Amino acid sequence: MSQRILLITNGLPPRKGGSETLGYELVRRLPETGEGSAVVYTSAGSGGHESDEAQPLLVVRDSARTLLPTRRVARRAADLVQEYGCDRVVLGTAVPLGLLARGLRTAGAKEIIALTHGSEVGWSRIPGVRPILRRIGEDVDALTYPGEFVRGGVQRAVGSTASHRLVRLRPGVDTDLFHPEADGSWVRERFRLDDGPVILCVCRLVPHKGVDALIRAMSWVRARYPRTRLLVVGDGPDERRLRALAAWAGVDAGVVFAGGQPHERMPAFYAAADLFALPSRPRRTGPQTEGLGLVYLEAAACGLPVLAGDSGVAPETVRHGETGYVVDGRDPRGVAERANRLLWSPGHARTMGRRGREWMLDEWTWEQAVRCLEMLHS
């Protein structure tokens, strides 16, 4: 059977990151994907080549480390549309891949959907970029957005002529993989967490994620609950600074850096924790804005109360006061107060976690996200 869907993305597993892999997670779950009707055009730096043959999708690798809308990439994308008879195209990121839309349309694509994640809001604030976003909005059939924060920013950028193309598409979480009954005992044993309270943080270690605020918060947390440990899962350029900060703050005995971990191991890490915290904050420089963050959804699906930073789309992953709290990542003491409240009342924390799990099952499944994508096609 000839392929009908083309996904163009810079994110393909085992590459980590919710926004980078959103398009892949959606397309691979489409009903027709199992019949071999999907092609992925991706970059050389978007994951391990050795896993391509095991993918349910036909993977076409470009030689570039990152796909950008250059003339060469545009020609290759158009050739794939014609070679495989693709009448539907999903662009993994609206900016900059949305600039490929006109050439894809000329090549025969009848439907083009571009996914936004949060960074588009930041891009829209840069002089000269808003006209590019407006052009993308006019060239595609639909611009999806994960939450109201992104919708507002993108709508201002694309203007009234393209605002009707904005469609809410929430990413999903695999509630079968991420569930409260997972076994976290080996994580506690391996990282010597004993049986004290554990605060889990999962992210790429970069300054705007707010891990430094968590480390500072541990001074107040451990003053009240001395056996509490902060378990940090992830790697990145900020790790050395964060380790030095933990030592300077005198909480290095209470902070454990577990490094990056494979996705399939993550349920055990959530199971080893009592609460999840990622107090991301707005970036001081650069165009990027905090995306929705699948780790918040994974934690909630595992029955953990969630502390989410007040940046970008992150607050929309928490029902404040019901499934967790939205916190200011610039206020370590405020973060500590929320964490201490949950540690002081385990029953309250479990109730929040249960409500979070129910919310994920009701509104944040991949099945619902796929149905939304299919509705755009109908």
Image (cartoon, rainbow, N blue to C red):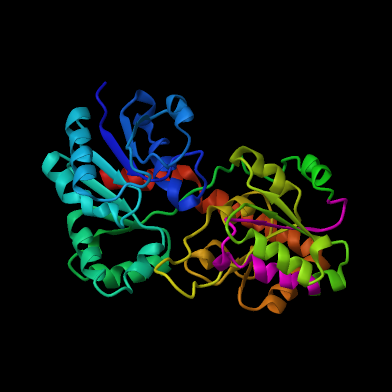
Q: Quadrant of the C terminus?
A: top left
Visible in this render: residue 365? yes
Q: Observer-nearest residue: 202 or 368?
A: 202
Query: Can residue 143 be found in the magenta stretch?
Result: no
Residue 154 location (% of width, % of height): 32, 67
Please name the residue shown 43% across and 29% down the image.
52
Q: Observer-nearest residue: 187 or 171?
A: 187
Please name the residue shown 72% across and 78% down the image.
333
On the picture, is 234 further left or further right than 72?
A: right
Identity of the residue furthest to the top in this view: 1
> How many numbered callouts?
0
On the picture, is 128 further left or further right than 306?
A: left
Q: Quadrant of the N terminus?
A: top left
Q: Observer-nearest residue: 12 or 244?
A: 244
Visible in this render: residue 176? no
Placement of 210 over or under 46, stated as above or below: below
Placement of 249 over or under 95, stated as above or below: below
Residue 74 location (% of width, % of height): 20, 44
Please name the residue shown 52% across and 64% down the image.
314
Q: Quadrant of residue 176?
A: top right
Residue 35 location (% of width, % of height): 35, 24
Q: Quadrant of residue 161?
A: bottom left
Give the extent of the magenta segment: 193-219
Identity of the residue furthest to the left in this view: 106
Residue 40 location (% of width, % of height): 34, 36
